[in-house]
Image: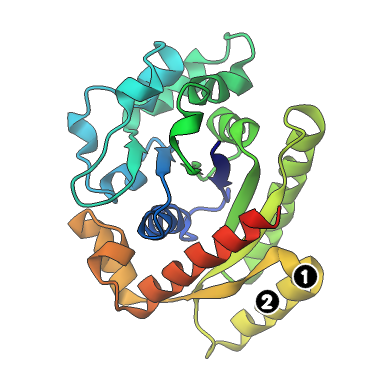
Amino acid sequence: MAKIFCVANQKGGVGKTTTAVNLAASLAALDQRVLLIDLDPQGNATMGSGIDKAACEHTIYEVLVDGVTLRDARKRPEAVDYDVLPANRELAGAEVELVGVENREHVLRGALAEVIEDYDFVLIDCPPALSLLTLNGLCSADGVIIPMQCEYFALEGLSDLVNTIKQVHANLNRDLKVIGLLRVMFDPRITLQQQVSDQLKEHFGGKVFDVVIPRNVRLAEAPSYGLPGVVFDKSSRGAQAYIQFGTEMMERVRAL
């Protein structure tokens, strides 16, 4: 049965989608069966996996709102070795349409039940907001991966996210836990980033992943080609770091 993980941070621009896409590609390269769920109306994980979000017949919107099965909506892009449940701007309407639905926080969990045996890992790329969509992701997941930049304001947002995870754990999903914090877009030459990194390790200890993702131009270029950085340029420093992260993630899952 698949392990389900949200990649979440309510702060935008922190490398959340980059992490979701590249972790999916890294795990697939390690012979894992992976499903990447794009739960963000921007559809960046969809495009970053090589799918034209405007041309999709079915997306996660139809799964959540219209009862289309996840098996019918998922896609296997040509350039990558993992499946994708795509999203586009229609997903923004699901926020309103789910409000009156019974057990609205668990709609995605119910949809996942039919394919859970098809995968080793399910990764959910959550939107940069603590919304009903994010709540569906958190209620479906075994744990949360939190990518974050080592900057002062990132620490402020982190406390809000951790509190939300605790509330969901207490009230809606007793299986939910923080799997780890991933330091991304890291530049060791910047003193503040090193200081924040040290604070994270001091406060969260073993919850901070050992792997650090460096700031890397090739990772930033990859989405414009519709590819994860791990596929676009496997030899780049950023791609190599995500491949190491995939290995560390598998080790951490085994220890759960």
What percent of the width, then of the height, locates residue 251?
Answer: 60, 62
Which residue is pictured at 64% across the width and 14% down the height? Answer: 103
Residues tagged 1 and 2 counted as in contact (Cβ below 8 A): no
- Residue 158 visible in the picture: yes
Q: Quadrant of the N terminus?
A: top right
What percent of the width, then of the height, locates residue 232?
Answer: 24, 65
Q: Amino acid at mark 2?
A: Val
Which residue is pictured at 57% across the width and 14% down the height? Answer: 99
Label 2 Cα crowd, 10 Å radius (few <14 / some 14-19 / many 20+): some
Which residue is pictured at 29% across the width and 78% down the height? Answer: 235
Precedes in sequence: disc 1 or disc 2:
2
Q: Which mark is residue 196?
A: 2
- Residue 43 visible in the picture: no
What percent of the width, then of the height, locates residue 229?
Answer: 31, 65
Would you place residue 142 above or below residue 98 in this image? below
Q: Amino acid at mark 1?
A: Gly
**Nearer mark to the viewer, of 1 and 2:** 1
Element at label 2: helix
**Structural distance between the alpha carbons of marks 1 and 2:** 13 Å
Question: Is 171 situated left or right of 141 in this image?
Answer: right
Question: Is 108 situated left or right of 34 in this image?
Answer: right
Asked which quadrant contains residue 173, the reply is top right
Q: Nearer the viewer, residue 232 or 218?
A: 232
Q: Which mark is residue 205?
A: 1
Element at label 1: helix
